[in-house]
Amino acid sequence: MTKLTREQILEIIESERARGERPDFSDADLSRTDLSEVDLSEANLTWTNLSGVNFSRAILRMADLSGANLTAYSPAGETILARTNLEGADLREATLGGADLEGANLAKAVMSGASFHWANLSRISCVGANLRRANFRHANLRKANLSRTDLGRAIFHLAHLEEADLRGADLRGADFKGAKLCQAILSGAVLVEANLNLADLSGANMRGANLRGANLAGARIDTTTQIDDDWRLVWELVNQGGVERNLRGRDLHMANLNKANLSRADLSRADLRRADLFGTDLSRANLRDANLRGAKLFKADLRGADLRGADLYGADLSRANLNGADLRGVMYNEATTWPADFDFAKGGAEQLVQ
């Protein structure tokens, strides 16, 4: 890997552009170089060593930085990309641990699989960017603009997202465990199956957000949190329990109620399609005529529960406790999984209903 100075880099840029070619620094060593205000638009920087480089106010629009190493040196210095124009840049699988990107423009950039752990990303703009599977552990994303950004399965463990704009962002399967989302804007965001365990959502705006299957266990929601009534209910059931609660006919479709205490609750005619009821206490609950199609009832406690007329098409009841449960008239099919050696006749489920 060739180590290049600022002067050599500028000469290469000038000569290659004079020939109508894009500057090529692939696999080169540009570490600890001052490249502030340098125009590297459309440059090839794939797998380049850019550790400790000062890119402040540089232009990297449409540059290819896939696989590049932008990890900050510590304590000798840091990679500086503050207020840099990275619009449309390719940063797939790039490593930017500890880098300073405050105020950088990353609109429409492709950064899937990139690592930003401990990086400073405050006030960045990532509108329309692809950040799927990106790693933001411990990163500073305060007041970042991530609206309409693809952040599917991104990792935000213990990250700071206070006042961040995540409106309409795709956050399916994203992991926000322990993240700070105080006063963040999440209206219209897709948080399907996202992990919000121990996340601080106080003061956040979550109106219209899709939280189907999201884990809200231990999440902090206060009176200033704006969240749709159905999802506030799910949060209450998971964190405060729902013993003997009247939930008759409620829409809990795809709700994550993993290990919630719903003992003796009235869930008759409730919509629990594809709900996550793993290990949930439903002992002596009223589930009469409830829709449990595709529900995950693995290890659920259903002792003495009233399941008469319930729809169990495709439900997973493996290792569930059905002792004393009333199963007369339940609807099930070949995709329904029952506990091993379950006695159908004893519970009243006598025949396969197509």
Image (spheres, helix red, strand yellow):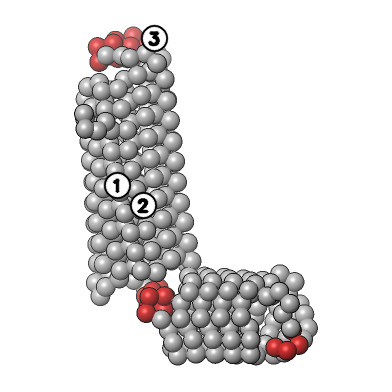
Identify the disc placed on residue 268: none
Q: Residue at x 28, y 38 (%)?
A: 98
Q: Amino acid at mark 3?
A: Arg
Expressed as whole percent of the image width and height from the top left, the position of residue 119 reads 28, 41
Mark 1, secondary structure of its residue: loop
Q: Amino acid at mark 2?
A: Phe
Q: Residue furthest right?
A: 351
Measured in 3D between alpha carbons, the distance from the residue under mark 3 to the one under mark 1, in whole angstroms, is 41 Å
Is residue 299 toward the left or the right of residue 51 in the image?
right
Expressed as whole percent of the image width and height from the top left, the position of residue 299 reads 58, 74
Q: Mark 2 highlights which residue?
A: 156
Mark 3, secondary structure of its residue: loop
Q: Amino acid at mark 1?
A: Ala
Q: Nearer the viewer, residue 57 or 117?
A: 117
Expressed as whole percent of the image width and height from the top left, the position of residue 248 reads 50, 88
Q: Nearer the viewer, residue 53 or 11?
A: 53
Q: Residue at x 25, y 23 (%)?
A: 32
Measured in 3D between alpha carbons, the distance from the residue under mark 2 to the one under mark 3, in whole angstroms, is 44 Å
Q: Mark 1 highlights which residue?
A: 139
Q: Quadrant of residue 324?
A: bottom right
Q: How many numbered discs sit on the rendered protein? A: 3
In the rendered structure, are the residues bearing label 2 and label 1 in contact, judged by CB atoms less than 8 Å apart?
yes
Q: Which of marks 1 and 2 precedes in the sequence?
A: 1
Measured in 3D between alpha carbons, the distance from the residue under mark 2 to the one under mark 1, in whole angstroms, is 8 Å
Expressed as whole percent of the image width and height from the top left, the position of residue 235 reads 38, 74
Q: Nearer the viewer, mark 3 or mark 1?
A: 1
Q: Is residue 314 visible?
A: yes
Image quadrant in which the C terminus is located = bottom right
Q: Which of marks 3 and 2 precedes in the sequence?
A: 3
Q: Quadrant of residue 211?
A: bottom left
Q: Which of marks 1 and 3 precedes in the sequence?
A: 3
Q: Mark 3 highlights which residue?
A: 19
